[in-house]
Image (cartoon, helix red, strand yellow):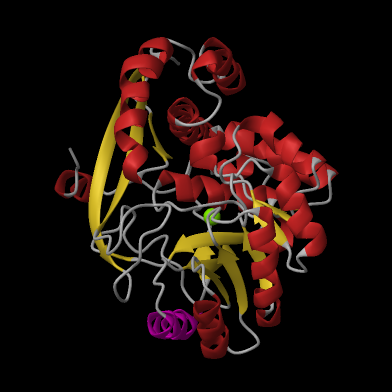
Amino acid sequence: MKIASIESIPLRIPFTAGGRSDAGAWGGANLQTVDSLIVKVTTDTGVVGWGETFGFTAIPAVRVVIDSILAPELVGRDATQLEKLMLDMQKKFHIFGRSGAFIYGLSAIDIALWDIAGKVAQKPVYQLLGGSDATSLRSYASLIRYSDPELVRENVRRAVADGYRHLKLHEIDVDCVRAAREAAGDDIEITLDVNCPWSVREALDMTDRLRPFNLRWIEEPVWPPENYSGLAQIRREGGIPVAAGENASTLMDFQHLLEAKAVDFIQPSPAKMGGITELKKVFALANANNITVMVHTFYDGPGLLASVHASAALGGSGALVEWRYFDLEAQLYGDAIVPENGAIAVPQGAGLGLEPNADVIRDYRGV
Ligand SMILES: [Mg+2]
């Protein structure tokens, strides 16, 4: 079974998030649309698999990599030799970057090839990864940045009313975090993702001020994201557990993160760091280091499904899946993947278990 074609498909779907958003790592203020990039891989036997890479402003660069560089290399290759294909591509193109567009594009193709592998085996991907008896996983509502305590308060209340027991904020000031804790009460688990704004000293000053709010973790507190010794210092001295890893790429980078004792929670992002092939190795590595994997999942397509399957099979009872708390005008999978009472269903169909809605792809295809 050979790879016959690889097609990249950008999507642009309007959304609302319960009020005006502030600028963040994902884009400008008052963001109106979610831009995502999915890939469709078709085999010479007619099996179709779907993958996804990280979207937003990276899309044009990743498309060029997929369409002009990776697809010509991969078409005609054996679709079942996932491990070998991924290693061959990483080796062949390593001098052009070990993260960013190359690995993002490769990640999307890898996820699609796992979808194909599951469909051929007639098993869901989580079974290929070792199996699970979980039919759903707890999920956390990942709120966009508002930088407005009132909006934070309102949206925390909304998420709690929707049944979430776990929330993530993307705020960077103390007043917004205080508003969230006051609105949520003491029993809701809150994490804070600040997306690398601070020096180590600034981060320690902030952890001093944030400690009263009982955060489950602080995510990427220091600049730059690969400042692993800086993260380790926050972990030792900050008094709040540290999470990071969405900007780490490929297995060796995660090894460096763990060697530095930089994190309490490690956050591989399957659509950025090498797909399911690389993600399953990070679970093993994290187990050996007694560190919990919390898969980064700022996606709502095949990248989300990859996280769900891997977390179901490999994440143990503590698995928690990120759910972007956006109201999208259209969902690629309809309601099938939308959490209910803070739990996300583990798809039971073959491969990734759900097929993208063709009408949504037609109606929201980007340029
Ligand atoms: Mg993050």
Dominant secondary-structure state across the stretch colored magenta? helix
Q: In which quarter of the image is ligand 1?
A: bottom right
Residue at screen point 52% across, 22% down: 97
Q: Residue furthest left?
A: 363
- Inspect this view and state whether residue 302 appears: yes
Residue in the foreground of this view, choosing between 274 and 336: 274
Q: Residue at x 73, y 41 (%)?
A: 257
Residue at screen point 33% across, 70% down = 17
Q: Looking at this view, is 179 or 137 the one in front?
A: 179
Residue nearest the viewer, comparing 256 with 292: 256
On screen, 311 above or below 318?
Answer: above
Which stretch did the figure color magenta? Answer: 149-164
Percent x, y of residue 86: 56, 21
Quarter where residue 29 is shown: bottom left
Q: Can residue 164 be seen in this view?
A: no
* Residue 161: image location, x then y, percent: 45, 86
Q: Position of residue 246 (x, y in %)?
A: 57, 46
Residue 132: image location, x then y, percent = 67, 53
* Number of numbered discs: 0
Residue 125 falls in which quadrant of the image?
Answer: top right
Closer to the camera in the image, 85 or 286: 286
Location of the C terminus by quadrant is top left
- Horizontal arrangement in the rendering, residue 359 relative to residue 177 (left or right): left
Q: Which residue is drawn at 72% across and 49% down?
A: 230
In the rendered image, residue 156 lying in the magenta stretch gets the answer: yes
